[in-house]
Amino acid sequence: MSERVKDQLEVFTGTSNPALAREVCEHLGVKLGEAEVGRFPDGEVMIEVRENVRGGDCFVIQSTCSPPNESLMELLLLTDALRRASAGRITAVIPYFGYARQDRKVAPRVPISAKLVADLITTAGASRVLTVDLHAGQIQGFFNIPVDNLYAMPVLVGYLRKRVDDQKVSVVSPDAGGVERARAFARRLNANLAIIDKRRQRASEVAEMQLVGEVRDSIALLVDDMIDTAGTITEAARTVMAAGASAVIACATHPILSDPACDRISRSVITELVTTNTIPLRAKAQGQLANLKVLSVGGLLAEAINRIHNEESVSSLFN
């Protein structure tokens, strides 16, 4: 094992998004930490950290994406291994925080999954959490440790400004819960704001949509934090096109893209889908979605990690 200096910045990763972890390390100018992440013959996750981390400032980069249970266990066991190896501080860097959609009781006898996962991460030994575009901001309060919730908006807006140029734009929230996010995009793009009132029959199935606002003769920019089965975003695209939009661009931070998302998007009126690499793209999405643009949050995460390591302000990234 190599010798390490106390308080040295160390970056480790599981198997959920190693390409993003390597990109972050390139931005930071550090080497990715040596850790074996494998499986026992029965499928249990096996972790071994293969270098000295005593007193180090350790960052574990791991999106809890598909397969979510295995990704979460890798994160927990990596954190526990670093804690037992006497790491000075452990930051769980979770570009996509899974299990966030059940963040409150909306029906009898359902769990608050986001709170349980927060407790597990804290118990495993994390000193703080760094994530990107939480599904619900109140999840930060589920932790008893510091949480930095980064926004991918600067990365997305930088691309969208060039993409729409001087054309008329209307930013549309596909549901009432995303109005604050859509308003922030609209302000930065100097665009109109519209909202879609969405009613569901059951989870992942939309029953009815009504547009509130004006999109006629403008590019409709549909903004959301994630796209899972793409039922909401494709129905929203159809709704705004029926209301007179000239084109539809969908924009979301987390490309979950579970089946049948790719088929729905391919058949939809969406001109372009803009997303980030918080989640690795599924092979089907890479091969089927010709109108897909993936932007990197590697530089954003690296800057936040560097500021945390140097005890500098993270919030000033977005001022």
Image (cartoon, rainbow, N blue to C red):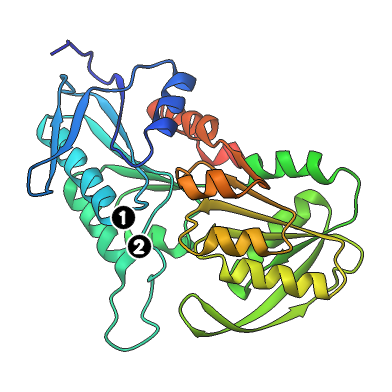
Q: Which mark, by number, is residue 99?
A: 2
Residue 281 position within the rendered picture, expressed as x and y whole percent measured from the top left = 48, 45
Kindly identify the residue that appears in the image at 47 percent across and 29 percent down.
302
- Relative to 195, say whether 309 is above or below: above
Based on the displayed image, in which of its 4 quarters is residue 286 positioned? top right
Contact, mark 1 vs mark 2 (Cβ under 8 Å): yes
Residue 5 in the figure: left or right of residue 265: left
Mark 1 vs mark 2: in front: 1
Name the residue type under label 2. Tyr
Q: Nearer the viewer, residue 235 or 51?
A: 235
Based on the displayed image, in which of its 4 quarters is residue 267 positioned? bottom right
Kindly identify the residue that appears in the image at 29 percent across and 58 percent down.
118
Name the residue type under label 1. Pro
- Relative to 162, say whether 206 is above or below: below
How many marks overall? 2
Q: Nearer the viewer, residue 236 or 307?
A: 236
Residue 238 position within the rendered picture, expressed as x and y whole percent measured from the top left = 73, 72
Residue 84 in the figure: left or right of residue 137: left
The quadrant of the image that shows the C terminus is top right
The quadrant of the image that shows the N terminus is top left
- Relative to 211, say whether 59 is above or below: above
For label 1, the SS is helix
Residue 279 position within the rendered picture, expressed as x and y whole percent measured from the top left = 45, 46
- Relative to 136, say whether 152 is above or below: above
> Within 10 angstroms of label 1, few (less than 14), some, or many (20 or more) residues?
some
| Res. 308 visible in picture | no
Q: Which mark, by number, is residue 68?
A: 1
